[in-house]
Image: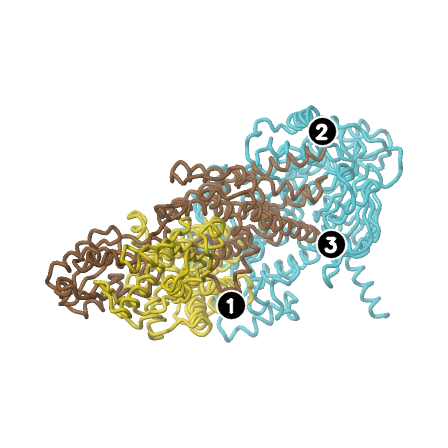
Chain colours: A brown, B cyan, C yellow
Amino acid sequence: MWWTRLKALIVKELLAVLRDPRGRVILIVPPILQLLVFSYAATLEVKNVDIMVLNRDSGAWSNELIHRIDGAPTFRHILRAQHPEAVRDAIDMQQVIAAVQIGPTFSRDIEAGQPADIQIILDGRRSNASQIVAGYLNQIVMGLSADTPGGRRMAPAVVSVVARNWFNPNLIFQWFMVPNLVASIALLIGLIVTALSIARERELGTFDQLIVSPLRTHEILLGKLIPPMMIGLFHITIYILAAVYIFHVPLRGSLLLLYGGAVFYLAAVVGLGLFISAMSMTQQQAILGAFLFMVPAMLLSGFATPIENMPSWLQPVTLVNPLRYFLIIVKGVFLRDLPLSEVMANTLPLALIALCTLSAAAWLFRRRLE
Amino acid sequence: MAGPASPFVQITGVTKTFGAAAPALDHVSGTIEGGHITGLVGPDGAGKTTLIRMMTGLMMPDSGTIDVLGFDTRRDPARIQTAIGYMPQRFGLYEDLSVQENLNLYADLRGLPRAERPATFDELLTFTDLKRFTGRLAGKLSGGMKQKLGLACALLKKPRLLLLDEPGVGVDPISRRDLWKMVKDLTTEGIGVVWSTAYLDEAEACDRVLLLNQGKLLFTGPPSEVTGRVDGRVFKLSGMTGRRRPILAKALDQDGVVDGVMQGASIRLVVEPKVDVAAIAAAVAGADVTSAPAQPRFEDAFVDMLGGGPGGRSKLAEATTALPTDDHKPVIEARGLTKKFGDFTAAQDITFQIPRGQIFGLLGPNGAGKSTTFKMLCGLLKPTGGEGRVAGFDLRRDTAQARNRLGYMAQKFSLYGDLSVAQNLEFFAGVYGLSGARKRERIKLMTEIFDFAPHAALSAKDLPLGLKQRLALACAVMHEPEALFLDEPTSGVDPITRREFWTHINALVEKGVTVLVTTHFMDEAEYCDRISLIYRGRSIALGSPDELKASVATTENPNPTMEDAFIALVQASEADEDAGKAAA
Amino acid sequence: MSDPAFTRPEHRDRIRRFAALVRKETYQVIRDPSSILIAIVLPLLLLFLFGYGVSLDATRTRIGLVVESATSVTQDLAASFQASRYFEVVNGRDRREFEEDLLVGRVRGILVIPATFAADFAAARAPKIQVIVDGSDPNTASFVQNYAQGVVATWAALRAAETSARAPTIAVEQRFWFNPELTSRNFLVPGSIAIVMTLVGTLLTSLVVAREWERGTMEAIMATPVTAGELLAGKILPYFILGLASMSLCVLLAVVLFGVPFRGSILALYALSAAFLVPALGQGLLISAATKNQFLASQLALISAFLPAFLLSGFLFEINSMPTVIQWVTVIVPARYLIPSLQTVFLAGDVWPMFGEAIAVMLLIGAIFFIVAWRNTRKRIA
């Protein structure tokens, strides 16, 4: 008997989302947009930047340095400056992100086996990018240094740092971003679809029909939870397929564990969505509420920036953020073949959060009935 | 403009279509005169709001012209807007601003000179009795007060033409009468008033009407001309023994009967010309029934114009199994139901019992507490005090079993707009526990009875109002409930659809279904066996429609309408309250 | 026929109507909680998030340091790492201790000073140390590598100086102008101010107009002598002021609470902000002219204004690194011009040539938005 009721409700919820043109738009546009934008546009990599060179040296080594800088794919245009004011202006106006100043005795010093130096000036206003640029420039200089007569002599004495990148040997940014997107799209869709569901019924006036019907409160909640979870799992699957077949991100761990974690994650997210929906009187309030939650959730989860960079007093706040745990699971399963124990360690908090949000939603729901 | 005899508004061949739907207005022509109240009359969707908006110059017709006060709405809308007063639906008030702030705003927007303001404000505030509330936020006013404030804002610059869009909707009858009086006074000063309404009794009081239905103009002229159509063809049958509902059903199926409705214990019939009423009366009701001519009403004529009402058979009821009528326990019961929201008491100590096979009405204006009472009984709200039971069960506590016995039709027929007709039916069937063969059978039955087949794939939100109502009813009765809860089930529909609906309900009641209905249409109350009049959270009267009317009959008014009864009873109750306060 | 009720609109009447609309709007802003939410609470939240929550500085990255054999040289090198402010070092003897930590994320890298290091270093036999990083976060991985190299190079140079051995041939002296501490907050907070103004200018404005349509008040006031222009202006002015007020609040917080330096002039700050509000408000009006529905308006505002301001303005992600097609799209994102200028006002001081350019482009985009919005704002319902 209860199954008949619940099934009718689940079918209705799915139909309501799929038959509403706005619902369809939400299900299609944000996922595609997100995938495109974050995989290609929103990257923390640095490419195609312009730099300026003030070269007061007339020897071969400065030309060689400039030649190497030019050859690096990171740098697009190299502007030549004739005097320091040009450097100052160019950086002030952000025409270039960095400027390399080579002194008049550069080549001579190198030939003579004396220490030579160059100055690099970087725009601290774009501090992230300029640090990366500084790193690249330093690499180039070190490479040149090793090729100088003095450098070649000293080579055996130079301490080199041999780097090995585990899990992502070529440091491909998309291998980091696309698994993250799996988690964030589930958050986005799960929150929005659920947040709208009760608010829409209230606006339409059909909410009373549900309450008057034989559906019990927990059946209504279940009926409102399961469809968004189904939709969320669908989107997760699409993203996993895209990750593997379009972006060639390796899938080293167990897909089963990933889906297992996904179920609890979605339960937590959908519980939150229901809570927001139970609080909102109109669909527009629901959207703003979902948005109000999503922005901090994305920013404080390790999505773009690591949690350890946050101030220590703020880090505990992330413990209640389901995205944080699922990000670890997703990236772990894709790139690191995360062992079961670790997956469990991250799934348990998700289950707890799900329990809390669902109970809160149920409680609020019941209270709203008064 | 040539002289005072020219019409204030001249509408010529106006057509307006929105999207792919049928035209909202179809070649409508007419005039509005100064010094008159002209009614724009018709059910929801008739085109009244569209026509009024076009008169304000804010919407243009697709074809045809409208001249307002000598200006063409296409060429000089700005000039029109300086000379009119307009009150849209929902009154056009800023809820976050106080009464005085709203007035100031409109005074500034209309360019009322500073010097004139104190006098004008004073006059208007006194006129609308809002003087004590100037500091109150508009959002916190009652419906009637909002209506008056909206009117005051529209009157600030003494407009020549006043356009009111459904000003009386849902407001209590006393406020509605006050407003009417105010507006009537204005016409004596030569102001032209357009009052749009779906209430056909208001239509009768207008000086002239433009009668619209589904975008078409059915009539223009004095309402008496409309009513005149059915002169001599309206009769009242009274003194029947036996149940009046089957009698009405039989009467409707007789040849020669155009329309029939219930009026308390009597039946009102409109017949074809030259029909022998006595013969019909005897045929349907037996020998002791008397038939007497009755004063025709606007509604009688309107139904006649639309081709007459529906027949008396309800295939729905025929397909319903009769419920046993042997036990005499009340099916719906309210005992001391009270609901407080903070320190606001929405409903106070409401008590009544509804036995099987009866229609019980909760009658009162919006905000009186009837929806609150209704919701407490069907389990949507938890009472602060008292209890409500359906078929012996307390719905707040109880199981699916109890809820399976009731059917519910929400206000404005809340259906799932994005789902198709068929999907809505499937959903409600499933939710009420119908599955497998039984479900298929019931859905098929509903589709046949209500003729859903041609529209089965249409989304519910695209259905015309009449079909929506039918679908809502179908969804509510698919599981053959014992009790039906109907919340304002016929608001806004045209009279024909309303009659069809009541035919079904009446027939179901004959099969033993119990019905609780809320309405603010005084005339709809006549269908009920008993009514509770709800005003300001209290039940101020309880009894059959005839009893209530009789209780306020006076020598000046020996045949009061339901509305008269309501007003008199409210006034009496307020007098009692004041006396009580004085004595205390 | 001349209707005595109608006269040519006098200036005085215009001003009175405009003032009435502005007054009405102000009351509504103050009394409506959702406006306060969007104009004050949301900005504070954003500022807080970007001031504290988001940091691109890889400070105190946890790494495991394995010193396979302890000698004075290796201890000395280890000490350099331990002293570095970029690393939070966990000591160990064997890399296998840390491998699981790296897998699980308890450390972000493992530095291994192999047993042969001391000998290789003394004999100048290409001494190596190994750094193993978690590549699944490329940004942090790069930082760890770079910092490790930096620490090593500095240490080697110091040792060379002490023992007067040969110095590296090319030394790089690098200076980061304007933000020498490289605190990411210093560029994130000014950037988030642009987003705050987008919220007020575009999201709030579009919502507020759509709300008037939904509640029926728009219809009512259009039936008065008020003109479409007065309606527009009456909406814009209060939200313009509110936008500047939100901005001022944020700037105050940025300087006082977050300690972001402010080296430019107040004039430049307000000139840039005012110029930005023009396209922001224009877009808000355009959205509300296109849809008279609050729900759609809020979605459109979020997608077409907030997200681009966030993602496509150079705020977090470098525009130069984006594919060319998307770089073309960023040309019409007003935040793209505001953010570098704001970062300059805070960190560098007044650079009027840059500001002038930014102001000009923003005003141009704003003018286009306004013209289109104007054309679409008629006193018409349908």
Q: Nearer the viewer, mark 2 or mark 1?
A: 2
Give the residue number, with chain letter if any, for mark 3. Answer: B369
Residue C232 vs residue B130, the one in the foreground: C232
- The kind of residue on which mark 3 rests is Gly
Please state the horizontal and vertical placement of residue B105, each as a whole percent of the image. Answer: 51, 67
Image coords of residue A106 (percent x, y): 15, 65
Closer mark to the observer between disc 3 and disc 1: 3
Residue with the mark numbered 1? B107
Q: Secondary structure at mark 2?
A: helix
Q: Is residue A218 visible?
A: yes
Foreground residue among B398 and C251: C251
Q: CA distance from mark 3 to mark 1?
A: 35 Å
| Camera-nearest residue between B212 and C149 | C149
Whole-angstrom CA distance, mark 2 to mark 3, is 32 Å
Q: Which residue is mark 2?
A: B316
In-image side of C180 versus B192 (left or right): left
